[in-house]
């Protein structure tokens, strides 16, 4: 099956979690807006297609299915591409972990948009500083501490089972994004995030992921995406 991924151009954003799963599997897919522009997304959001209605990108077309919500898309792809063990206990746990990643991603977004999604960062800088201070001091350590514990409870190297699942790919992306956006805060957590760092390196070294990261398909982190580096928000 050839998938169609719909996500905004120019940023990794939430679409990147889906891209990583597709790239890891060497699945055949078209990143539609990168070819046709963001306008390719709009008819779906206006409900001009039959079937399921997405609220926001990313969404994935798989045959007749239109699937939105990052965690939901990953849960759909994973069993088809060997990215999750077969047991329902594993799949439910994976969804739980992925939803927790969704939560911290939303909080990372809110560090630069603490007041209004539709306003520019420059219009909410003062609030962004306060929000980021709390995110760096309290929330990153709490979430990453949790994910370290998840790895410890597993085999020490994988979130679920003994092979890399889609959750591990997403933890790679989370760690990469936080390192980009908050290098100071993350430096202070180095010793407490040893397992996550090792996992991040292992995922980056997987042949299909390494090839993807070195390709033009991997959009560099930038200040339009979710993980943005503003030095004034990373003064720990
Ligand atoms: N919970 C959703 C969030 C989707 C989302 O917020 N998408 C952003 C782009 S990363 C968007 O376009 N939002 C438009 C809006 O919220 O109005 C997910 O994880 O997929």
Image: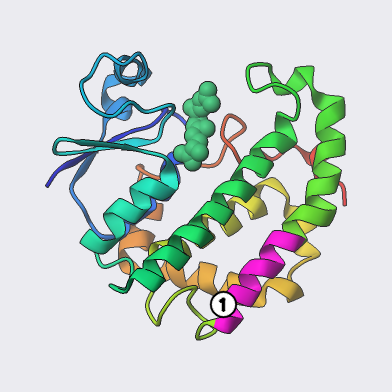
Magenta segment, which residues? 142-153
Element under disc 1: helix
209 in the magenta segment: no
Q: Return the residue at label 1.
A: 151
Using the rendered view, name the quadrant where residue 187 is placed: bottom right
Q: Which of 93 and 102 is in front in this view?
A: 93
Q: Which residue is drawn at 21% across and 43% down?
A: 29
State whether residue 102 is above or below residue 126.
below
Residue at x-position 56% and y-position 77%: 151
Residue 175's place in the image compared with 116, above or below, is below
Above or below 175: residue 7: above
Location of residue 165 in the rendering, given as x and y in whole percent from the top left corner: 39, 68
Asked whether, in this view, residue 104 is left or right of residue 73, the answer is: right
Residue 99, how many percent across, how many down?
A: 52, 52
Magenta-drawn stretch, dominant element (helix, strand or loop)? helix
Residue at horizontal 31%, vertical 16%? 47
Give coordinates of residue 144: x percent, y percent: 68, 64
Q: Is residue 73 above or below residue 5?
A: below
Left or right relative to 9: residue 138: right
């Amino acid at each position: 099956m050839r998938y169609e991924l719909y996500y905004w151009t120019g940023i990794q954003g939430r679409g990147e979690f889906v891209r990583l799963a597709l790239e890891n599997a060497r699945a055949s897919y078209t990143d539609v807006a990168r070819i046709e522009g963001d306008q390719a997304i709009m008819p779906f959001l206006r409900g001009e297609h039959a079937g399921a209605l997405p609220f926001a990108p990313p969404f994935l077309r798989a045959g007749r299915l239109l699937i939105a919500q990052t965690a939901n898309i990953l849960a759909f792809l994973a069993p088809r591409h060997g990215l999750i063990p077969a047991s329902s206990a594993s799949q439910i746990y994976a969804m739980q972990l992925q939803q927790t990643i969704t939560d911290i991603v939303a909080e990372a977004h809110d560090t630069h948009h603490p007041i209004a999604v539709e306003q520019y960062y420059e219009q909410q800088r003062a609030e962004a500083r306060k929000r980021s201070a709390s995110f760096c001091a309290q929330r990153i350590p709490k979430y990453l501490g949790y994910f370290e514990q998840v790895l410890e409870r597993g085999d020490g190297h994988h979130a679920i089972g003994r092979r890399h699942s889609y959750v591990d790919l997403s933890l790679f992306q989370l760690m990469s994004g936080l390192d980009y956006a908050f290098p100071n805060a993350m430096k202070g957590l180095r010793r407490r995030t040893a397992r996550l760092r090792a996992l991040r390196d292992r995922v980056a070294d997987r042949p299909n992921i390494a090839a993807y990261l070195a390709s033009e398909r991997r959009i560099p982190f930038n200040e339009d995406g979710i993980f943005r580096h503003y030095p004034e928000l990373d003064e720990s």
